[in-house]
């Protein structure tokens, strides 16, 4: 039902609005909210029933279709089709908090090109809960810190359209594209940090993070090592992904998830090296 009204609104919404003054006035209010205040309208499928076809028209929403692209390429496709000044991402197993957009938009308005907040993750496989990054970490993310571990989640990040386009978007590597993307962004731009939880994430057996094997990890880390060589980063920073790679080759066969990888990284002291 929701898709039907969305498509109907995009195809016939203008004609529908033009026939009824009362509907036109409602659509005008929605348009002003979006244009003047960058308001994002999130509406339930029960909203106004027959008037739902007006909403995609009022918001300037568009449907972009791409099948089997993978997360990074799908985000790039959506960004290329958008016209907004700010881009935010939402993966299928994640939920934004009520103040998500307001918190990140405020940081971008302060002059940051990239803003991020805390993600609370519930691991359905073992019942654990954890935060990415820690809400108590007052230091902004750094290139060195990201070289030690990817402490950012796409669903908790906002980026200006200018920065996204200048960086080229998510690289076409097939796995771990978010880690490479964030490394490139932090090398180029100022990041703003909101220390509250703005995204809730669910890990389960079907999650990509639960299906990662040592071959995927090795592939990703070799790409990161190549990136370090391309931009001639300091040797002590370039050493961090190499430490990861040695760890994966020695122990990766016994890991069953990204969390196992993270635990091994903690034990090996790689995160401490990233905080020096």
Image (cartoon, rainbow, N blue to C red):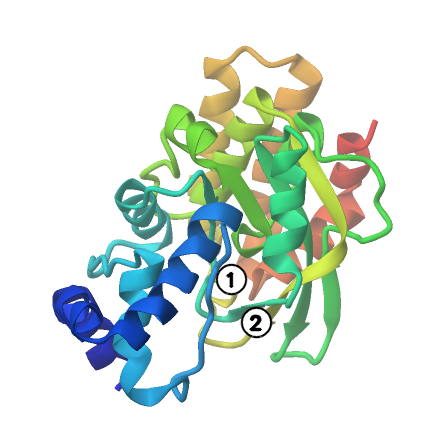
Residue 247 can be seen, yes or no = no
Residue 130 lies, in percent from the top left, at: 74, 65
188 or 10: nearer the viewer: 10
Residue 209's mark? Answer: 1
Label 1 crowding class (10 Å Cα cut-off): few <14, some 14-19, many 20+? some
Label 2 crowding class (10 Å Cα cut-off): few <14, some 14-19, many 20+? many
Most extreme residue toward the front is 21
Residue at 85 percent of width and 41 percent of height = 138
User: Which of the 4 quarters of the picture holds residue 69?
Assistant: bottom left
Ranked by sequence position, the earlier of labels 2 and 1 is 2
* Total residue callouts: 2
Circle 1 SS class? helix
Residue at 64 percent of width and 26 percent of height = 190
Q: Decide: is 15 above or below 245.
A: below
Q: Do callouts 2 and 1 mark residues in contact (Cβ within 8 Å)?
A: yes
Q: Name the residue under label 2.
A: 203
- Whole-number angstrom distance, CA of label 2 to CA of label 1: 7 Å
Residue 66 lies, in percent from the top left, at: 20, 57
Residue 219 can be seen, yes or no = yes
237 or 95: nearer the viewer: 95
Left or right of 275, for residue 19: left
Residue 1 lies, in percent from the top left, at: 26, 87
């Amino acid at each position: 039902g929701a898709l039907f009204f969305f498509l109907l609104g995009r195809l016939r919404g203008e004609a529908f609005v033009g026939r009824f003054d009362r509907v036109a006035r409602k659509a005008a209010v929605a348009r002003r909210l979006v244009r003047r205040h960058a308001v994002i309208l999130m509406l339930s499928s029960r909203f106004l029933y027959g008037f739902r076809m007006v909403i995609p028209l009022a918001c300037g929403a568009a449907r972009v279709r791409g099948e089997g692209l993978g997360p990074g390429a799908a985000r790039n496709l959506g960004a290329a089709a958008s016209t907004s000044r700010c881009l935010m991402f939402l993966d299928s197993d994640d939920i934004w908090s009520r103040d998500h957009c307001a918190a990140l938009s405020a940081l971008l308005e302060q002059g940051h090109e990239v803003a991020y907040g805390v993600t609370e993750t519930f691991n359905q496989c073992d019942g654990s809960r954890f935060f990415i990054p820690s809400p108590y970490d007052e230091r902004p993310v750094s290139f060195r810190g990201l070289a030690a571990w990817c402490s950012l989640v796409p669903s908790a990040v906002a980026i200006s359209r200018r920065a996204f386009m200048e960086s080229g978007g998510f690289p076409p590597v097939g796995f771990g594209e978010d880690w490479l993307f964030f490394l490139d962004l932090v090398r180029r731009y100022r990041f703003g940090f909101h220390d509250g939880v703005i995204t809730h994430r669910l890990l389960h057996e079907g999650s990509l993070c639960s299906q990662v094997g040592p071959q995927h990890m090795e592939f990703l880390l070799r790409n990161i090592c190549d990136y370090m060589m391309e931009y001639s980063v300091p040797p002590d920073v370039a050493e961090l992904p190499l430490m990861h790679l040695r760890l994966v080759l020695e122990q990766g066969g016994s890991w069953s998830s990204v969390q196992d990888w993270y635990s091994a990284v903690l034990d090996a002291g790689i995160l401490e090296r990233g905080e020096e």
